Image (tube, helix red, strand yellow):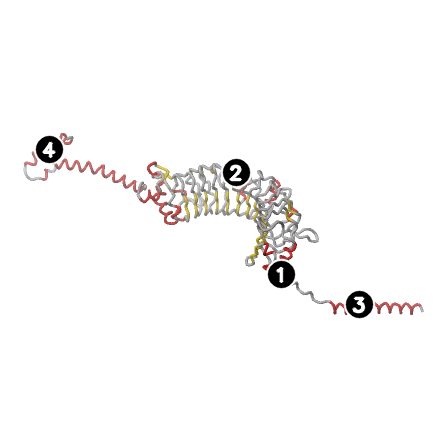
């Protein structure tokens, strides 16, 4: 009897459960509908584009100098649900003081320069997974604020991911004096790092570790940081470094670290107090370097032999505005690469020597002057004598034919009678002669020195009848005898 009751109860429960499941399935199939896609907001007609400039064609949202604070929640709603994705957002010159965690958006270039930012929330950029360029320059960021977690990427099951796409980071013109050794651990693929105009004074070991760990780095700007050297190992890690900008520092010697930058293509050392490039203070082998700039170097006075000999790929050399530079050795560029009897020279196309104190240009400084596309020699006190024979009689004319603007202000600094006269005029009016012309004049002088006495002697001899031997009558003999005896007396009349 009990078994029958139990079976009946179980059957009843089964029926109830079955009916509930059936009812739920029926209800689900009849009430659930596909979600309707949310209609996109037309961004160009939105309040955001009345507040900022929206350039739909170039996917640029320009809000520089137009905001009192960060974009509002409503602004972000328009961006996130808009019919346009702005790949570049500029929020410069808005007096922003901090950076919060920003909403998820597919912006690629974010410009926050020229604000008053002195704090950044941890993981502030974690939702900007497509970010390529981040400009934080011209703010008030300190070393204490710039901690590794600022650049944390999106959170995953195990940890925070990296911001894999971030390639360009500009931290210039802030109040940094050092970098955390692990500052870039969440942004390991940085290719361009700008640190200019932060008063480091010295790149300490922590900063060296941070920079040397950027193995993808291609451009490094450490200009105007008041440093007097680069640590020897700072360029060990970024072996693919192509551009190094180290202008406006306190280098009085070429940094030894340059020897590790074997893939450099461009080097800028402007405004450093280097006095000369002689002896051991010359460039190491940089076989891929094509561009070298050393301008406004207030103490540079001499470029010695071999200074640029190891830069055999150099195509552009800029040495302008070095007011004390007065000597460039004719062997500054040459190198005996093959070991043969001929020297090798870099394939220079542009040379800028304007606004220096150079007076003589050695012809042997380059062999193929004719390969130059630009040669700027303006505003130097050039010697307008035979020491510049090649410059005056050949080179200045070639400059005038290819780039006339670079020829008209090339002027003499001496001798006094030619002071401030253009080399073009000196060449055109033959105010000095070439070495070949000088040889011709020497030859003419020698001929004259021989010919004049000969002609005078012949005339006197003729006058005195020395040629009377050719006469057939007898009177000529007595006349010739008389003339011969009185020759000396008549010569002194």
**Relative depth, front residue between 183 and 439:** 183
| Residue 327 x, y percent position in the rendering | 42, 38
Q: Identify the residue under disc 3.
A: 21
Residue 36: image quadrant is bottom right
Per the rendering, the mark at residue 483 is: 4
Q: Earlier in the sequence, mark 2 or mark 1?
A: 1
Q: CA distance from mark 4 to mark 2?
A: 87 Å
Mark 1–mark 3 distance (CA, rounded to whole Å): 42 Å
Compare marks 1 and 3 and give the one earlier in the sequence: 3
> Which residue is label 2 attached to?
251
**In what element is the residue under mark 1?**
loop
Considering depth in this image, is 106 or 288 the residue closer to the camera?
106
Residue at mark 4 to residue at mark 1: CA–CA distance? 126 Å
Going by the image, does 52 lie left or right of 33? left
Q: Residue 184 vs residue 354: left or right?
A: right
- The reply to whether dot 4 and dot 2 touch (C-beta < 8 Å) is no
| Disc on the earlier residue, 4 or 2 | 2
């Amino acid at each position: 009897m009990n078994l029958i009751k139990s079976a009946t109860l179980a059957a009843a429960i089964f029926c109830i459960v079955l009916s509930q499941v059936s009812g739920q399935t029926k209800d689900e199939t009849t009430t659930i509908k596909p979600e309707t896609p949310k209609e996109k907001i037309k961004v160009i007609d939105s309040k955001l584009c009345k507040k900022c400039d929206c350039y739909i064609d170039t996917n640029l949202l320009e809000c520089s100098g137009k905001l009192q604070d960060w974009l509002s929640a409503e602004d972000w709603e328009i961006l996130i649900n808009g019919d346009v994705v702005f790949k570049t957002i500029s929020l410069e010159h808005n007096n922003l003081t901090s950076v919060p965690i920003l909403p998820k958006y597919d912006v690629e270039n974010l410009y926050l320069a020229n604000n008053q930012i002195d704090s950044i929330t941890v993981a502030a950029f974690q939702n900007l997974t497509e970010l390529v360029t981040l400009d934080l320059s011209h703010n008030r960021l300190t070393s204490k604020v710039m901690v590794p977690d600022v650049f944390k990427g999106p959170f995953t099951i195990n940890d925070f991911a990296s911001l894999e796409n971030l390639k360009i980071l500009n931290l210039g013109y802030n109040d940094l004096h050092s970098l955390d050794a692990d500052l870039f651990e969440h942004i390991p693929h940085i290719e361009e790092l700008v640190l200019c105009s932060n008063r480091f004074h010295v790149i300490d070991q922590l900063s060296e570790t941070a920079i040397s760990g950027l193995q993808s780095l291609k451009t490094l700007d450490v200009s105007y940081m008041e440093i007097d050297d680069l640590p020897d190992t700072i360029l060990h890690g970024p072996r693919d470094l192509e551009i190094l900008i180290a202008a406006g520092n306190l280098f009085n010697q070429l940094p030894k670290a340059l020897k590790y930058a074997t893939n450099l293509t461009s080097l800028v050392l402007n405004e450093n107090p280097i006095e000369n490039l002689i002896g051991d203070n010359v460039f190491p082998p940089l076989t891929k370097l094509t561009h070298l700039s050393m301008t406004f170097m207030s103490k540079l006075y001499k470029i010695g032999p071999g200074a640029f000999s190891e830069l055999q790929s150099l195509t552009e050399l800029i040495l302008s505005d070095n007011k004390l530079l007065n000597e460039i050795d004719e062997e500054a560029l040459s190198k005996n690469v093959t070991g043969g009897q001929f020297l090798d020279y870099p394939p220079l196309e542009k040379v800028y020597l304007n606004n220096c104190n150079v007076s003589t240009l050695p012809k042997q400084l380059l062999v193929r002057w004719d390969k130059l596309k630009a040669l700027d020699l303006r505003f130097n006190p050039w010697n307008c004598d035979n020491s510049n024979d090649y410059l005056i009689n050949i080179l200045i004319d070639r400059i005038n034919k290819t780039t006339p603007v670079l020829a008209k202000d090339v002027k003499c600094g001496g001798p006094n009678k030619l002071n401030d006269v253009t080399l073009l005029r000196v060449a055109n009016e033959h105010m000095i002669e070439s070495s070949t012309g000088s040889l011709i004049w020497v030859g003419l002088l020698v001929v004259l020195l021989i010919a004049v006495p000969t002609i005078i002697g012949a005339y006197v001899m003729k006058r005195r009848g020395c040629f009377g031997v050719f006469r057939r009558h007898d009177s000529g003999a007595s006349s010739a005898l008389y003339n011969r005896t009185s020759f000396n007396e008549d010569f002194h009349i």
